[in-house]
Image: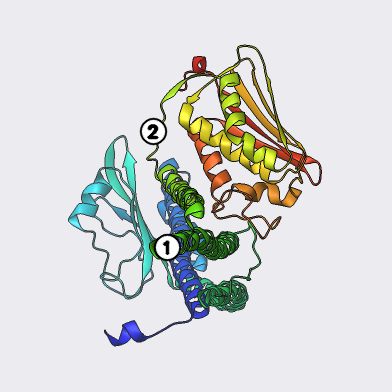
Amino acid sequence: MSRWNKVKVKYLYQQIFSHMGVLLVAFIVLSLLFTQYIENLVYKDKTDELINYGENILLDLQQGNKMPEQVINQYANVLFGRDIQFSVFDENINLLNPIKWKGPPLVLTEKEWRRLQAGETIVSKYDLKRFDQDVSFVAVPYIIRGNFIGGVLLTSPIQGTQEMISEINQYLFYAALIALGVAVLLSWFLSKVHVNRIKKIQAATSMVSAGNYNVSVPSTNFDEIGELAKDFNQMVDKINNSMEEIESLENRRRQFMADVSHEMRTPLTTISGVIEGLRNDMIPEAEKEKGINLVSKETKRLIRLVNENLDYEKIRSNQVKLSKEEIELEELLEIIKEQLYQQATEKGNEIQIEVADGATVFADYDRMLQILINITKNSIQFTSDGTITLRGKNDDKEAVIEIEDTGTGIDSEEIEKIWRRFYKADLSRTSNPYGAFGLGLSIVKSLVELHQGEITVTSEKGRGTKFVITLLHRESGIN
């Protein structure tokens, strides 16, 4: 790595240097352009003045009201006082009166002579080769009836003009120094403001990289730095939300693992104890049938727990394929009632069915059965000596299924959380209210959405809960 790659220049100095560089370049360019403009303007005014005098001299000579010597002497008194020298010459460029300058006699170049004979006025800003000082001179041709008979040469030194331009440049230089001084102060102030804003974002970024996400920086829509601060705050908010979600998910995962261990330990312990008792003939003959039934029951419980978890993973990975058909709602709800009758009776609950005549639903039979059993079991678990009502009807383009109970209900702040994976409400610590692994209602919601349907829940603490499932009819084009 080269030495220059290791050198760090503060952003404040970069801003000031860049501003100064831009101002210097701008002043230099403007000064050059302005000086050139003034110079051209002054020389143009001077040459226009000389040409005007030359034309007036020729006009007076042409009118013939005065002798040529009188005309020349008259203009000489005026022009020599203005430091303008002139001379009239004939077609052979012989001077009719001497020009008052020190130096060689007048010699026009061949090109200038041809132009002059063609009736063109000769104008030159500098003539360093022919005069001992810088001069502006013009040669005005004298044409009568198309014939070249001579002309007038006028000269004026440019020393005064250069002094004026030098003075202008001096004032420009002073103005540039003052402007640079003001610009340095203004640039330093503005750069300091921007640098401080950037440093705040930098400090906040360092805190985020160190793991502190409770930071924010002032943001505005005034400029890009303000927009950067706004984006930074939005990023931190999203990180905070993600961290909260990750923490919540991790807590639910720990709870899930604890639930798995607890739920599986009990049936496995029971199965292991019964098998050991049967192997060692520790169970009386009259109790063996009861023990075998207990093993069968606990085995089915384990299978259900495993299947529930596998179902969720299949749904999440889009491995579940639906086979939809037209299902009579009354028949479907009667099956739910029959399968869960015993569980409801054990808690003193009654299952009622209210179905509109001819009501149907277009869905996958097995998955629809799974959805309704999960929800109804949930209602039975939180209802004692109450009623679970299963309703079904058809609207214009939808099938609506309701499961309503008169149980303990759910807190309003808990309602949206019941759909989360691993979520376990604190309504009961002895059993999992939403399926064995806290996956039951999560599976329910995923299966309803897989049917392109919608499920909602309303509840009031101590007055029961109602789940509403809405699915489109077959005519809607959902296959």
Q: Badges 1 and 2: C-beta atoms under 8 Å apart?
A: no
Q: Residues within 10 Å of mark 1 (few under 14, many from 20)?
A: few
Front of the two marks 1 and 2: 1
User: Which corner quadrant of the image does residue 203 belong to?
Assistant: bottom right
Task: Name the kind of residue labelled 2 in the image.
Answer: Lys
Where residue 269 sits in the image (x, y, percent)?
Answer: 49, 63
Query: How did the renderer colour the structure?
Result: rainbow
Q: Is residue 399 above or below residue 24?
A: above
Quadrant housing the C terminus? top left
User: Which corner quadrant of the image does residue 118 belong to?
Assistant: top left
Residue at the (55%, 55%) spot, across then down: 422
Where residue 107 sits in the image (x, y, percent)?
Answer: 23, 62
Where residue 31 sits in the image (x, y, percent)?
Answer: 47, 67
* SS state under label 1: loop
User: Which corner quadrant of the image does residue 211 belong to?
Assistant: bottom right
Q: Is residue 326 above or below residue 25?
A: above
Residue at the (51%, 54%) spot, across then down: 287
Residue 228: tell me if it is visible.
Answer: no
Q: Which mark is residue 321?
A: 2
Residue at the (81%, 41%) spot, across then down: 463
Say how many tags the image has. Answer: 2
The residue that disc 1 covers is: 281
* SS state under label 2: loop
Residue 303: tell me if it is visible.
Answer: yes
Task: Name the kind of residue labelled 1 in the image.
Answer: Asp
| 350 and 104: which is toward the camera | 350
| 443 and 384: which is toward the camera | 384
